[in-house]
Image: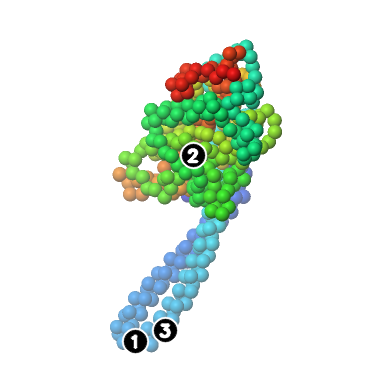
Amino acid sequence: MLTIKLIREQQEYVINRLKIKNFDAANLVDKIIACDDNRKKYQQKKDNLQMQMNEISKEIGNLFAQGKKDEAEVARRKTGEIKEQIKEAETFFENYEKELDSLIVLLPNLPHESVKSGKGEIDNEIIKEGGVIPKLTVSKPHWELIKDYNIIDFELGIKITGAGFPVYIGKGAKLQRALINFFLDEAENAGYTEILPPLLVNEESGFGTGQLPDKEGQMYHVNADNFYLIPTAEVPITNLYRDVILSETDFPIKNMAYSACFRREAGSWGADVRGLNRLHQFDKVEIVQIRKPEESYHALEEMKSYVENILVKLGLPYRVLRLCGGDVSFTAALTFDFEVFSTAQERWLEVSSVSNFEDFQANRLKLRYKSKDEKRTKLAHTLNGSALALPRIMAAIIENYQTEEGIIIPEILRPFTGFDMISK
């Protein structure tokens, strides 16, 4: 959430930067400033009336001390009238404050200066490519291979739940578990503390990280309890620090978590969403950092290098993209996407997004820190990244490592799987 201070002091800058995200903020910014003007007006009215109350209260005490009871009673009745005026001003103030909050949350985060304009993924900038695209002697997409090797069953998932909820079987389940353990070990070695969070969060948590009110339709909602199934472990991990004031000695904060993730957005048709390419439920290891503002972009580069190193160790061909304004999320200031190449599908599959949210989430979370040399608190910066989302990594491994004899397991995963090949 943008701060009202930023909106007021840099109105034109806010409007122009949000154009990079293809968001026309001019009318909304005008409404926000007008609402804030009214809020301030009634705040001032409350303060002035309260000063009158204080002065009259002192006068009443003096009048009683002098034995002037009649005059004291007149003054007391006056305080009754002022109390009603204060109550009325308080009501207007609260109404304008609620309206102000409801308007500000409609503004997306400002994109970083390096973000270029663009309509969508077609305008994203490829900044690096790595790995070697394999030349396959056999080339089947993973949705055929999983049937050949009986490692993932989509039909059973439909029977139990519905489309987008696969069942992992035998060596398929073990490969999934191997990837999870590999990702967690890598994150631990990089200095991240493991968290095992709840899979459901309350409305306040969804608001804190920006999923609400922006993405209600993409989240599964438990109506009876007003809980939401998490779309990513980012939500519960970052909300550990909601309403927290940190000290400088707490930094850097680096947490990671494995969790199941739930998203209602799947369900369209075509090769782009076939098989493991898009699911309603999937597993992911998430990394989250909380930093001081001056350190956050160094942390973003650190996280970007970390994700790239995992892909190198898996031996997958990859590329890194800087997202354009039209593809950067509502909450992010700058995002790098990682994609791996599926040789069998002949297309790139997104497997990670690494983002800096600057103080946008922190303002919603009321996540602040205090410097030892300053009395006032400051907003921290939050960052997160997928490290990694498993379905498309599984798809890429199954497809890129297929041979006539079977699916070869990447060498880095063999200590976790206990086998080096999945045979028919």
How packed mark 1 is, by other alpha carbons closer than 10 Å (few <14, some 14-19, many 20 or more), is few
Q: What residue lies at 51% left-to-right and 58% top-to-bottom? A: 97
Q: CA distance from mark 2 to mark 3?
A: 63 Å
Q: Is residue 394 above or below residue 23?
A: above
Q: Which mark is residue 74?
A: 3
Q: Is residue 267 visible?
A: yes
Residue 110 or residue 296, whichever sits in front: 296
Q: Earlier in the sequence, mark 2 or mark 1?
A: 1
Quadrant location, the C terminus: top right
Q: Is residue 221 above or below residue 49?
A: above
| Residue type of the residue flagged with mark 2 | Ala
Residue 279 or residue 158, whichever sits in front: 158
Q: Which residue is mark 2?
A: 233
| Residue type of the residue flagged with mark 1 | Lys
Q: Earlier in the sequence, mark 3 or mark 1?
A: 1
How packed mark 2 is, by other alpha carbons closer than 10 Å (few <14, some 14-19, many 20 or more), is many
Q: Provide the secondary structure element on which disc 1 rests.
A: loop
Q: What residue lies at 44% left-to-right and 70% top-to-bottom? A: 49
Q: Find residue 282 and report its image quarter.
A: top right
x then y, percent, for residue 192:
39, 33
Q: Provide the secondary structure element on which disc 2 rests.
A: loop
x then y, percent, for residue 106:
57, 48
How packed mark 3 is, by other alpha carbons closer than 10 Å (few <14, some 14-19, many 20 or more), is few
Q: CA distance from mark 3 to mark 1?
A: 10 Å
x then y, percent, for residue 295:
40, 35
Q: CA distance from mark 2 to mark 1?
A: 69 Å
Residue 101 or residue 239, whichever sits in front: 239
Foreground disc of the pair 2, 1: 2
Q: Which mark is residue 68?
A: 1
Residue 366 or residue 182, whichever sits in front: 182
Q: Is residue 128 above or below residue 377?
A: above
Q: Provide the secondary structure element on which disc 3 rests.
A: helix
